[in-house]
Image: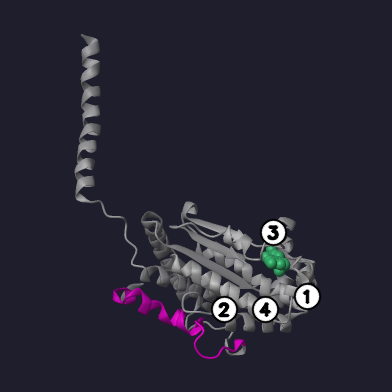
Amino acid sequence: MGKQSSQPLADQLRSFITPFRYDGSGEFHLKSYKTAEKGGLDKDKGEKIIEANRKRLVDFQEKLYAQDNWSMLLIFQGMDAAGKDSAIKSVFDGINPQGCEVHAFKVPSSRELDHDFLWRAAIALPERGRIGIFNRSHYEECLVVRVHPEILAKQKLPPKLVTKDIWRERFEDISAFERHLARNGTVILKFFLNVSKQEQRERFLERLEDPAKNWKFNMGDIAERALWAKYQAAYQDMIRHTSTQHAPWHVVPADHKWFARVVIGSTIVSALDKLDLQFPKVDKAERSEFKQVRQALLDEDKEKAVKPAKKGT
Ligand code: AMP
Ligand code: MG
């Protein structure tokens, strides 16, 4: 990154993170976050940052895996066509698949509905040393379920537990769950891909017009689009109540896909940088053991070299 590379990473990337992060301090109004922001960059500059962040991510991920203490949970939410799938594909391009797992949360199965709403998220959490990516998440429980009361009605909850307080209770439970994870070594970053209704329209039209994109179009998406205002209100309330210092939301401007990737990649690498990850150190005793093993391996070669000579005589 040329001239800037002598600056600490957090300083280099701050302007792509801080304006979009909400950690629960102060007020939150979704309307004050622009969807078409470009952070003073053009696409070319943006692509360079995206590529530099990918390299950093590869490096940090290897250390995270080797050190095996921390894990990272990345949560992606957004309206249909906000770019969740393609952002995940782009930001994690080139990452070792062994250290990272993506879970896409769809309509819950009957088995999942037989458990509490956090169950399926809990069993999908990343192990230590791993990066877990949630493409949609437990937050759908305060989004699609809130916008569609008929979904809540089918959740088999004991009726007397379903009161007007249910959303506040879910926010509290999610926050407690995430605090517990953070206290056990999971770094949590949450991304709301904030796309405009106009941009969603463009992307839906592309999906309808381009045969290679037809498969991405779902008739149900149009019905959800009609509920845009209700979703925006649900997102705002969710971000207000579940943003914390240990699990902040990032309201990512998503009308320009490349800028969304700048913000997401920068946020992730900056958080990993703060962990000061190191490859595990080898102690003195182990080093001397390594020396002996190395010598034994070298000696194997010598033995081999001697053997054929013996055979010939
Ligand atoms: P997509 O991400 O476009 O493949 O669609 C997944 C669908 O599953 C979306 O329509 C979500 O709203 C829906 N979904 C995800 N989680 C839940 C949930 N907890 N309850 C109901 N629907 C959900
Ligand atoms: Mg979809």
Badge 1 or badge 4: first in the primary sequence: 1
Q: Quadrant of residue 206?
A: bottom right
Disc 4: which residue: 167
User: Which residue is located at x 33 percent, y 77 percent?
Assistant: 4
Q: Secondary structure at mark 1?
A: helix
- Seen in the picture, residue 36 relative to 289 is either above or below; the reply is below
- Seen in the picture, residue 278 relative to 25 is either above or below; the reply is above
Disc 1: which residue: 149
Badge 4 or badge 2: first in the primary sequence: 4
Q: Is there any visible trace of residue 274 in the rendered image? A: yes
Callout 4 touching callout 3 (CB < 8 Å)? no
Eye-nearest disc, 1 or 4: 4
Badge 4 or badge 3: first in the primary sequence: 3
User: Which residue is located at x 67 percent, y 75 percent?
Assistant: 142
Disc 3: which residue: 112
Callout 3 touching callout 1 (CB < 8 Å)? no
Callout 4 touching callout 2 (CB < 8 Å)? no
Disc 2: which residue: 242
- Seen in the picture, residue 110 relative to 149 is either above or below; the reply is above
- What's the amino acid at mark 3? Glu
Residue 194 position within the rendered picture, expressed as x and y whole percent measured from the top left: 61, 79
Residue 23 is one of the magenta-drawn residues: yes
Badge 2 or badge 1: first in the primary sequence: 1
User: Within 10 angstroms of label 3, few (less than 14), some, or many (20 or more) residues?
Assistant: some
Q: CA distance from mark 1 to mark 4?
A: 12 Å
Q: Quadrant of the C terminus?
A: top left
- What's the amino acid at mark 1? Pro
